[in-house]
Amino acid sequence: MLKLSKKVEYGLIAMRHIASINDGKISTAKEIATAYHISQELLAKVLQKLAKEGLVISHQGMRGGYALARRADQISISTIINAIEGQLPRITQCTAETPQSCSIFEKCTIKNPLGKIQGNIEEMFSAMTVSEII
């Protein structure tokens, strides 16, 4: 079944947290990790990826931390997932596009229905923004 990775979960938690206090304040990885009882080390790596992809701004120094790079209603959930994982999770392992890449391609009865479901999932993740999960 479709399952988001721990990295994605941490990224969504962090983005939601940062957005919820987005009144000019910044959040540290330690603050977020402590608030949600999650691994600070893994969260820090996720936040670095989000910063590299331009979703959060990293502020260095003694009073450093992270802030959203854009408004929460301008950042889709799919953008966050793609920044962390490189692509949205798939509900099926099969991605065969031609008969040469799959021995049952011509007889497969689930490829098209599952493709529609995958499309709906991708559409939902693209339409939902961080502001909707605050």
Image (cartoon, rainbow, N blue to C red):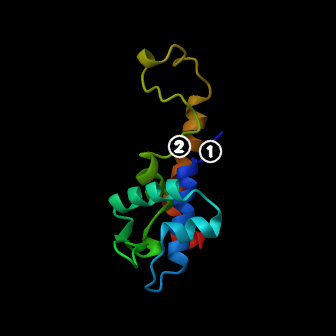
What secondary structure is found at the residue carrying circle 1? loop
In the picture, the disc for residue 83 is none
Task: Check the image and report above or below for 90 versus 69.
Answer: above
Viewer can see residue 15: yes
Query: In the image as oriented, which residue stretches furthest toward the bottom?
Result: 23
Instruction: Examine the rendering and report whether any part of residue 16 can be seen.
Output: no
Residue at figure coordinates x 37%, y 62% from the top left: 51
Vertical side of 23 occupied by 103: above or below? above
The image quarter containing residue 71 is: bottom left
Q: Which quadrant of the figure contains the N terminus?
A: top right
Task: Give the residue pinned by disc 2.
Answer: 89
Point out residue 81 in the picture as x, y percentages from the top left corner: 48, 53
Which residue in the protein does label 1 denote?
Answer: 3
Name the foreground residue: 45 vs 94: 45
Q: Tag 2, which secondary structure?
A: loop
Please rate how many residues cluster around mark 1, counting C-alpha atoms within 10 Å: few if below 14, some from 14 to 19, many from 20.
few
* Alpha-carbon span between mark 2 and mark 1: 7 Å
Residue at 51% x, 53% y: name it. Answer: 42
The x and y percentages for residue 127 are 51, 62
Rendering quarter of residue 38: bottom right
Q: Position of residue 125 (x, y in %)?
A: 53, 56
**Image coordinates for residue 100, horizontal then vertical, percent:** 41, 15
Q: Earlier in the sequence, mark 2 or mark 1?
A: 1
Identity, as a three-letter code, of the amino acid under mark 1: Lys
Which residue is pictured at 59% across the width and 43% down the height? Answer: 117
